[in-house]
Image: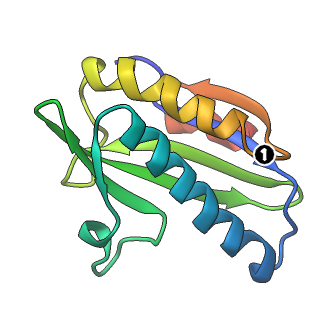
Amino acid sequence: MGQRFLSFRTAEGDHVSEWSPAADALSRRLAAAVEASGYATDFEACRYAGMQDWEFLARGHGQEFVVVLVLCGFRPNRWFVTLNDTHCKQLESLAVEAVVHPVLEGAVREWPGASGLRWHADASSLREV
């Protein structure tokens, strides 16, 4: 498979009152971009034990997958976005990646203060973010 994780930084502070609203808004922006590509999105489908607030299910074009936004560090805030299947495993679909990755990258690029966008083939290089 190709590049699996999109990492980036944002300017929000490291206090929960700053990064939590940003994460909510960014997650909604990602969902809107995915919806504009012809997928239906559903945040409620991912609200069960062990799932974080910034995951949403996407369905369409005969596919079903989860978009996951993760805050992985502070000062500056460091994030990544990845696609999972519905069993919390990495999505194995080049067809979905080809459509959705550019959409996600575009949504992040438009986020005020986003910088350092980079694709990673696996999680091992996320420590460098």
Residue 128 picture quarter = top right
Left or right position of 29 against 67: right
Q: Residues within 10 Å of mark 1 (few under 14, many from 20)?
A: many
Residue 63 picture quarter = top left
Q: Which residue is mark 1?
A: 9
Note whether residue 71 is visible. Answer: yes
Q: Nearer the viewer, residue 76 or 128?
A: 76
Note whether residue 121 is visible. Answer: no
Q: Nearer the viewer, residue 121 or 54?
A: 54
Residue at 61% across, 38% down: 107
Q: Where does residue 47 sit, x and y in percent of width and height?
A: 31, 76
Q: Where does residue 6 sit, x and y in percent of width and height?
A: 58, 34
Residue at 41% across, 17% down: 2
Left or right position of 20 against 94: right
Q: Where does residue 8 sit, x and y in percent of width and height?
A: 72, 40
Residue at 54% across, 57% down: 27
Q: Where does residue 88 sit, x and y in percent of width and height?
A: 27, 54
Residue positioned most to the left: 62
Disc 1, SS: strand
